[in-house]
Amino acid sequence: MKYSLKRHLGIIFISLVTGTILMCLLFNSTLLEKYYIDKKINALFSAYYSINEASSAGDIRTDSYDIELQKICGKYNINVLVADSDSEMIKTSMADSEFVIKHLLNNIFKGVNPQDVLREGDNYKMQIVTDVRTQTEYIEMWGLLDNGYLFMIRSALEGIRESVSISNRFLTYAGIVAVSVSALLVLWLSNHITRPILELADISERMKHLDFNAKYTGKDKTEIAVLGNNINELSETLEITISELKTANNELLKDIERKEQIDEMRKDFLSNVSHELKTPIALIQGYAEGLREGINDDAESREFYCEVIMDEAAKMNTMVKRLLSLNQLEFGNEVVSMERFDMTALIRNYIASADILIRQKEVSVRMEDYGKIYVWGDEFRVEEVFMNYFTNALNYAGGEKIIDIRIHEMDKKVRVSVFNTGSPIPEESISHIWEKFYKVDKARTREYGGSGIGLSIVKAIMESMNQECGVINYDNGVEFWFTLDNCVDITV
């Protein structure tokens, strides 16, 4: 590959190793000699303090100090010369001691060039000089000890330069070996890193062609493994999504096939609406014509005719309003306002407002003494749901004419049920009662002015709040129920 990650990794790592080694060589060439000289100056001072202390204590002439002096000279690679005020040799590790004494006396009496002095104290000076005989550079420290002895400590700089040269050569050889070994390691490492990446690239290539069987099988826990696991999950998700898309496409084809069925349903809907409106319109028309023709001239008959007309008009108005409300709910045009309210209070308030109807129907309403039970929902719509259930219960209550209202608190839900004694709903009608205009007992529905869309509105309201509703048949009656989200009462 032209832009191979393996190549990039190799170039980066080898460049870093080579650059590090070249930087070390640069530092060695420019700073190591100065560093060695500083260390050598510290060594001369250490030797000076040791010799000065020994001469002041009178130990410099002893054999034991000869051993100590040899250790100092060997450790720091220096030469030492100590002479008394008469230039008589006391201690020396130099082969040409007579020449060094003359050089020392020449420095003391004639002085030295101040520019050549590295460091200077009351009794000593330190400088770099060139031996006129051997043309060898030395760093030397000379002067007087505290007891008046003359001293000279010197060390050849050629050894320092040679050490720096050896160090640079060794670092160069070591760098070549390090670069070679690094190149091999980088080759192995890049193969180790890029192998799972190439595997992922192959998986993605197969995914591009909708082959979702390929899976990443790496067992490590690196970022690449995380990426591989994510690609595995992506592959599964894409497979599921494509399957869902194919299913949706199949459903779309079915929807197209059901277009004629939908048209038929629309025709049925119009037919049902027309049928529901035909009777009240005919009654209104008949009684209105009767009033106009004066079939009955007495005031009581005319009032009856007017009441019939007003009653039928009110029924049509109610049905149209409920149809509009149902239409808005089904098409999502109604905004559902979710709020926290007391379900117990809502039910009790409604029962109190329906007291006249309850007494007219001679129905007994039972409800336990529930405390405050708070729920989430659209309070206005929930009241409409309960109203539909309760109204149906009033109109269909039979036998003992009992309506039993229960509120059951579950883990996260509250279930409200309205039970009325009487005949159960026929089994063949259970699946249709939520449909618009469906009537189990058409004669009885017409008797109390029902339109057959109340339960359709209940279904639409509960679906708008993502809640459930249903019906249960019993031997002695029917129970309608719905659920709402529970809300724990935080009041004291």
Image (tube, rainbow, N blue to C red):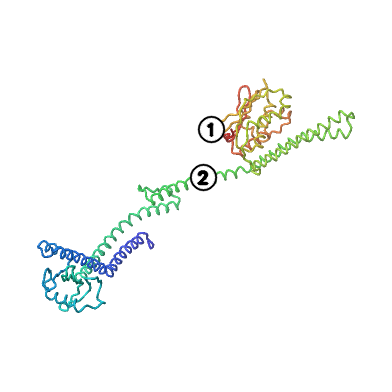
Neighbour tally class for label 1: few under 14, some 14-19, many 20 plus, Cα within 10 Å = few
What residue is shown at x 61% (from left), y 39% (from top)? 465
Amino acid at pointer 1:
Asp
Q: How far is the residue under mark 1 from the one under mark 2?
A: 33 Å
Residue 26: x %, y % from top left: 29, 68
> Taking 400 as reference, is 173 left or right?
left
Q: Secondary structure at mark 1?
A: loop
Is 119 in front, or is 341?
Answer: 119
> Taking 375 as reference, is 96 left or right?
left
Compared to residue 8, the image places residue 418 above or below, namely above
Which of discs 1 and 2 lies nearer the camera? The answer is: 1
Rendered image: mark on residue 66: none
Query: Is there CB contact under 8 Å for labels 1 and 2?
Result: no
Neighbour tally class for label 2: few under 14, some 14-19, many 20 plus, Cα within 10 Å = few
Compared to residue 19, the image places residue 349 above or below, namely above
Residue that carries the numbered disc 2 in the rendered image: 244
Residue 91: x %, y % from top left: 12, 68
Q: Secondary structure at mark 2?
A: helix
Rendered image: mark on residue 411: 1
Q: Residue furthest top?
A: 400
Amino acid at pointer 2:
Glu
Is 197 in front, or is 56?
Answer: 56
Is 87 in front, or is 243?
Answer: 87
Compared to residue 161, the image places residue 188 above or below, namely above
